[in-house]
Amino acid sequence: MPLNITNFIKPALYAALLFCSSSANAQVSLIDGLISKLDSYHNLSYRSINKRRDMGTDTTVAHNKELFLKVPDDKQFGYYYSIETDHQTESFHRIDLYSGKGIQVLSPADTTFFSEETPSAYGQSIIGSLKFVKSFYDKRTFPIKMATDTVINGTTASHIVVNVLDTTEDNEHLYSRREFYINKGTGLPILATIRGRYKYRNMVTDYYDEKRYFDYQFNQTGVNIARFAVPNSFRPRKESAVQPTLLTAGALAPDWSLYDVNGNRVSLSQLNGKVVVMDFYFIGCAGCMLSIKPLNAIYEKYKNKDVVIVSLSERDSKKAVLAFEKQYKIKYSGYIEAANVVKAYHVSAFPTYYFIDKEGKVASTVVGYDDDFEQKVTDHIEKLLNK
């Protein structure tokens, strides 16, 4: 009797598909199990310490207090929450509240609050992070595996590795790997990390984030909807009706004197006779970071002409700027402690660029970064050189 290869392939193919499906289900079940564990409580709270490094060399540190109340009828998150974030490396303290009617952000420093659409604090919580992985996996599967157990601060922890992204683009290895460490005694997360390299328009940058969780509390009394309402002592934030306007063309540019990261002191008056491009920036500002590559190209184009590019930061330390310039191979000079210059030039958005003519007068300004940035800056410079 001749062999019917079609009949032979069908069961084998079905078995292979069944195996792949079972394997995929087993992978995501690791995440489902953690979500179910946290979902089993009527309310839960914990504290965490978050360390993050992105686009620069400085690591930011934040202490967090997070409280969740399970609300099955809530279609957006399934929880009401209060997430307090107190940055230790910056003067920044906020409390994100959600009670089913939009996100309200409290500022304890001035007892004001404002509305926000992006649930950034929730996305960085352990619940938000796990549910992100699950929802993303449902759209496009990726490897999730159990790695070897490890010991963290004396606690034995199981180790889940989630490879959300692993690809190559323009010869750059881009990836995003999330890792969860679970206390084997309690079944609760004690550490979560994200390591990655991503491409943002013309720039490739590394990213690292870790969050340590501790002091879990469950099913506490007195946790009700009222805990997630804006306190009566807080008032709505009023945006200033009058925004500072940039200095107008033809105005004499205020003189300044600053040190670069190598200890060299330069003043604007010393640069008379040259076209000066003043770049107001800070490390981590997306538009500021995107401008590095075109500004380096502009520097190379005009380095032997009467053109000077000066970058001014009001917030970044000497150590941070030194490492930043080395990491991104910045060719033009960076100056620090420029808060008074920022004020004198009425800068309220970053990046902002001033073009100063050879006579020390404001010629023009550019705010923000666009794809035609390099051409736009070149046009301003050429106009001033030919003036």
Image (cartoon, rainbow, N blue to C red):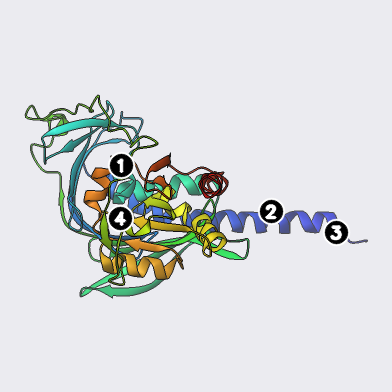
Which one is in front, 377 or 251? 251
Expressed as whole percent of the image width and height from the top left, the position of residue 288 reads 41, 51
Q: Label 1, on which residue?
A: 347
User: Alpha-carbon distance for marks 2 and 3?
Assistant: 14 Å
Q: Label 3, on which residue?
A: 5
User: Alpha-carbon distance for marks 1 and 3?
Assistant: 75 Å
What secondary structure is marked by label 4? loop
Q: Residue at x 42, y 69 (%)?
A: 327
Circles 4 and 3 in contact, beta carbons < 8 Å: no
Frontmost of labels 4 and 3 is 4
Which one is in front, 73 or 117? 117
Circles 1 and 3 in contact, beta carbons < 8 Å: no
Three-letter amino acid code at disc 1? Answer: Val
Three-letter amino acid code at disc 2? Answer: Tyr
Frontmost of labels 1 and 3 is 1
Three-letter amino acid code at disc 3? Answer: Ile
Instruction: Specify the farthest residue to the right.
Output: 1
Count neighbours of disc 4 (C-alpha within 10 A) and say few if under 14, some if 14 to 19, many if 20 or more: many
Comes first in the chain, label 2 or label 3: 3
